[in-house]
Image (tube, helix red, strand yellow):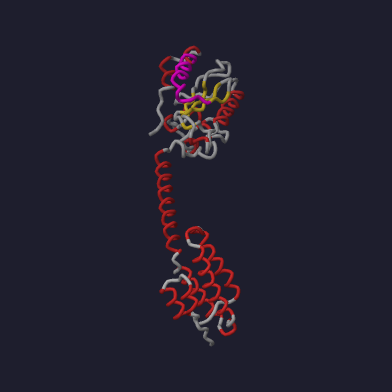
């Protein structure tokens, strides 16, 4: 196997440090194939691009470039004497030479800063998500509890029962289970699931109102005041269930409502006290006992 002698004058006239020169004197016995030349020069230029050309004087850049070019050219002329296995060895050696260049210290510093910044940003995002569960819930990307589906299910039931909405003496939760129209998610609300529907339909029994994320006002019919809220959220969320990313990040808290005659509404949390007071008055006017009407609007979501 032929040996290619390293031209020591190359490093004498360039800016490589003594460690790099010693590396070439002891290790540069061979060459790299022609197709590796382009990859090596690409790495060489990438290093300068990452660090910025202004970081190195022009004279030093030119001499360093000649050092790489002269060494690779002399090695490439003897490529027929080396085996394919030796190609890989010299690829590693040439890569080590590139990494020993003084410019890599700048790269390391910049990569360290980038890694630290990425870590800080990642930790901030993690803490923000954990501390804002109302934003990053199941409604973050899509409306997981479309109240329109629930309202249409109630209207469909009323058309089939002479205008009367579902009613149960065991509470409004059990009354909602009667609506087996495939819109169970719409009858619950943000932060709640449909397991109560599946359990009661399979095993029977009472569906506790505490397992529902929306309050259903039962005992009404289609002829009541169209302004009366029939179904509404227990838990206010940013913009409601129909508000998604990115607008959800900045939206104020609101609740979604389905009324008898006005359909879907979104009521902000700042307006909710006045809205609920007005609704209690409408329910009393419709014939509901004041205590029962007030009870609907005093229910609290699960913690």
**Nearer the observer, 194 or 117:** 117
Q: Residue at x 47, y 79 (%)?
A: 8
Query: Eyeballing the image, is 218 above or below 141?
Result: above
Residue 202 visible in the snapshot? no
Residue 291, by quadrant, is top left
Residue at the spot 46% in from the left edge and 63% down from the top edge = 103
Quadrant in the picture for residue 104: bottom left
Task: Residue lying at the far bottom in this picture: please name it.
Answer: 1
**Residue 130, position as x, y percentages in the image:** 40, 42
State the residue lying farthest toward the left.
303
Counting every numbered tag in the picture gives 0
Q: Residue at x 48, y 17 (%)?
A: 279
Residue 28, magenta (yes or no): no
Residue lying furthest top in this view? 285
Residue 226 in the figure: left or right of residue 107? right
**Residue nearest the viewer, comparing 242 with 52:** 52
Q: Position of residue 49 (x, y in %)?
A: 53, 59
Residue 265: image x %, image y %? Answer: 54, 25
Prevailing secondary structure of the magenta residues: helix
- Quarter of the picture containing the C terminus is top left
Is residue 157 toward the left or the right of residue 19 in the image?
Answer: right
Place of residue 207 in the rendered image (x, y in percent of width and height, measured from the top left) = 45, 32
Tell me, yes or no, if residue 260 can be seen here: yes
Please tell me which residue lies in front, 294 or 42: 42
Q: Which residues are magenta?
A: 266-282
- Foreground residue, 33 or 243? 33
Q: Is residue 84 above or below residue 256?
A: below
């Amino acid at each position: 196997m032929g040996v290619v002698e390293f031209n020591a004058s190359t490093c004498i006239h360039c800016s490589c440090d003594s460690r790099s020169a010693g590396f070439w004197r002891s290790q540069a016995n061979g060459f790299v194939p022609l197709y590796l030349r382009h990859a090596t020069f690409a790495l060489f230029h990438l290093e300068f691009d990452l660090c910025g050309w202004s970081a190195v004087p022009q004279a030093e850049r030119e001499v360093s470039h000649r050092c790489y070019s002269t060494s690779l050219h002399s090695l490439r002329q003897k490529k027929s004497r080396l085996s394919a296995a030796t190609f890989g060895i010299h690829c590693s050696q040439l890569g080590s030479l590139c990494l020993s260049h003084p410019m890599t210290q700048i790269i390391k510093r910049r990569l360290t800063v980038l890694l630290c910044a990425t870590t800080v940003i990642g930790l901030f995002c993690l803490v923000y998500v954990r501390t804002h569960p109302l934003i990053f819930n199941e409604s973050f990307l899509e409306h997981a509890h479309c109240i329109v589906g629930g309202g249409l299910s109630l209207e469909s039931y009323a058309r089939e029962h002479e205008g009367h909405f579902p009613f149960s003496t065991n509470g409004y939760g059990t009354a909602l289970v009667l609506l087996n129209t495939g819109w169970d998610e719409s009858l619950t609300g943000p932060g709640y699931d449909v397991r109560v529907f599946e359990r009661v339909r399979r095993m029977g029994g009472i569906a506790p109102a505490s397992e529902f994320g929306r309050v259903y006002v039962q005992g009404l019919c289609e002829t009541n005041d169209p302004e009366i809220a029939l179904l509404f959220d227990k838990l206010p969320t940013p913009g409601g269930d129909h508000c998604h990313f990115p607008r959800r990040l900045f939206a104020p808290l609101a609740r979604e409502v389905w009324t008898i005659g006005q359909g879907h509404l979104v009521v902000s949390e700042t307006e909710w006290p006045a809205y609920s007071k007005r609704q209690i008055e409408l329910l009393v006017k419709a014939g509901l006992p004041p205590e029962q009407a007030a009870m609907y609007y005093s229910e609290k979501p699960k913690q």
